[in-house]
Amino acid sequence: MKKNNRKTLTERQKRAMKTRKALLDSALRLFNEKGFDEVHIEEIAKEAGTSKGSFYTYFKSKDAVFLEKYKEIDEFYLNVFNKLPKEMSSPEKIRVLLSEGINLFLELGHEFVTIVAKSQLDTNMPPYVFSSDRTINQLIFKIVEEGQAREQIRNDLTETEIADMIICFYRGIYIEWCYFNGNFDIFNKGNQYIDLFINGVLKKKKNSLT
């Protein structure tokens, strides 16, 4: 008989996971309602039905809450990527990935996205949003590398240069949305800009001499 290697969570571990989630949800809800700077850790703990000490058991600071949310967002991108057909062209993969990201921003709301983005500018640590370790950044690099090998993406620049250019362009779309307090039509204009960027800048031209 084969042994079942799946580990069963203890009651203590289940309670810990429940408390951690309650703290995360409470913090994000309060940040969205009152603004990051106006929320204190004691308030987050009270909202979650636990103590300030418990907060520090799971998060080093308020900034760490946003880091956790970024990881959830990156998990979203990974799920989208894993569902892309292998035969899909590399430019189209980038188009779908970025477009689905816009849908996620709309679901989160511009107020929340603004607070999350601002938190990365206020931190004394290197912003996680710019890190090459981020899943979305790694996925874009992987698709660009694949696209150049297939001769679907321009190759007069390195994979890193093109991946950085894509991420910078994409970041600009949601920053524009935040800057105009959600009045920028991120769905229609955002997807239009993505199409123009991919067709006009990213794709390898048939008459390219490179």
Image (cartoon, grey):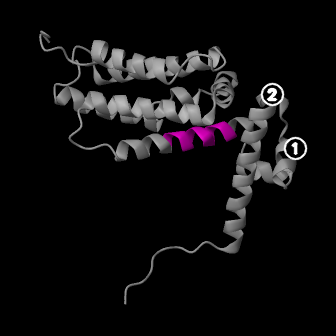
Q: Quadrant of residue 174?
A: top right
Can residue 9 be seen in this snapshot? yes
Name the spot of residue 137 as percent of width and height, x first.
Answer: 43, 31
Q: Residue 1, relative to residue 23: is it above or below?
A: below
Please name the residue that numbered disc 2 is placed on. 37
Tell me what residue is drawn at x 82 percent, y 44 percent.
Answer: 44
Q: Quadrant of residue 90?
A: top left
Element type where label 2 sits in the image: helix
Please name the residue that numbered disc 1 is placed on. 42
Name the spot of residue 112 as percent of width and height, x first.
Answer: 67, 31
Q: Quadrant of the N terminus?
A: bottom left
Q: Amino acid at mark 1?
A: Glu
Would you say residue 153 sits in the magenta stretch? Answer: no
Can residue 161 be seen in this snapshot? no
Name the spot of residue 153 as percent of width and height, x first.
Answer: 23, 22
Q: Residue 109, relative to residue 176: is it above or below?
A: below
For the stretch drawn in magenta, the main secondary structure is: helix
Badge 2: residue crowd in 10 Å (few <14, some 14–19, many ≥20): few
Q: Residue 4, relative to residue 122: is it above or below?
A: below
Earlier residue among tags 2 and 1 = 2
Q: Quadrant of residue 156?
A: top left
Relative placement, left or right, of 165 versus 53 is: left
Tell me what residue is drawn at x 18 percent, y 30 percent.
Answer: 149
Tell me what residue is drawn at x 86 percent, y 53 percent.
Answer: 51
Q: Amino acid at mark 2?
A: Asp
Tell me what residue is drawn at x 71 percent, y 70 percent.
Answer: 12
Q: Which residues are magenta?
A: 65-74
Q: Residue 53, relative to residue 112: is it above or below?
A: below
Residue in the foreground of this view, choosing between 141 and 104: 104
